Amino acid sequence: MSENDALDKDPWNALRRFTQARIALGRAGNSVPTAPLLAFNLAHAQARDAVHHPLDADALHAQLHAQGFNTLDVHSAAPDREHYLRRPDLGRRLSEESRAALAQLPAQPCDLVFVIGDGLSAFAASKQAVPLLQAIQPKLADWTVGPVVVARQARVALGDEIGELLDAKIVVMLIGERPGLSSPDSLGIYITYAPKVGCSDAQRNCISNVRPEGLDYPQAAHKLHYLLTQAKKLGLTGVGLKDDSDALLTSAPINPAVSDGSA
């Protein structure tokens, strides 16, 4: 009997179509078969690449402009990827140049500002952010929305300073999440009401695993719009704002991916 024949007859193998998790891999002596081992090594390499791959900010700006969005470009205080990974605090504050540039803009208070940050996966920011913005844009006709800010070497809290300088009531950070071995391109959404330097994670709401294989764009846009509407109504985000968006859906229940606070 060949290795593939043995795998095909494994009764657990039928469960693999329901998940990307590594189950029913089979066995070859004291290890797994060659194909699953190579797949694991590839996934590990893809996750490492996602962390170190730079964000192509010019291409992202071009995509946003093609969809009719105005944009701004900023950089955190982390000068490069090495400093970003070793000094998380630098990724939470703007560079002096970016802070000065935002501070010099004409005062234009707005309801909402979106920030696209590379985070720990520039792949996610490049692939998922623009389709998500396209999905949420029609739901925001009654909102005043500022320019989309593209932020390099960004941590979640960088959005607080950006939102404060742009005088936004709410800031939404779209940021690459820490890559997993089956999801190197997962996007996280962090919503903060009254953003300012020093906001804690308890003051945010998070929608995670945004990608076609996880929480798809229409579902993510539905959750985001619900949380934005409730945040505007209640004047808060974070632990005081619960996600009841699934109750509004008439279709089948979706897998919840919202938590209070962030990592």
Image (cartoon, rainbow, N blue to C red):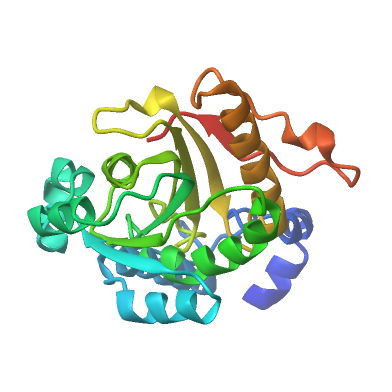
Q: Quadrant of residue 53?
A: bottom left
Q: Residue at x 51, y 53 (%)?
A: 145
Q: Give the residue furthest to the top.
A: 240
Q: Is residue 160 visible?
A: yes
Query: Where the C terminus falls, by quadrant?
Result: top left
Q: Position of residue 39 (x, y in %)?
A: 49, 70
Q: Position of residue 161 (x, y in %)?
A: 26, 42
Q: Residue at x 24, y 33 (%)?
A: 197
Q: Is residue 56 visible?
A: no
Q: Residue 140 versus residue 89: which sits nearer the camera? A: 140
In the depicted structure, whether residue 99 falls above or below residue 135: above
Q: Residue 45 versus residue 254: which sits nearer the camera? A: 254
Q: Position of residue 241 (x, y in %)?
A: 58, 23
Q: Position of residue 250 (x, y in %)?
A: 91, 43
The number of discs equals: 0
Is 12 left, or right, of 27 in this rendering?
Answer: right
In the depicted structure, whether residue 136 falls above or below residue 43: above
Query: Where the N terminus falls, by quadrant?
Result: bottom right
Q: Residue at x 72, y 29 (%)?
A: 244
Q: Residue 133 versus residue 23: which sits nearer the camera? A: 133
Is 89 left, or right, of 198 in this rendering?
Answer: left
Q: Quadrant of residue 60?
A: bottom left
Q: Quadrant of residue 146?
A: bottom left
Q: Residue at x 32, y 55 (%)?
A: 119
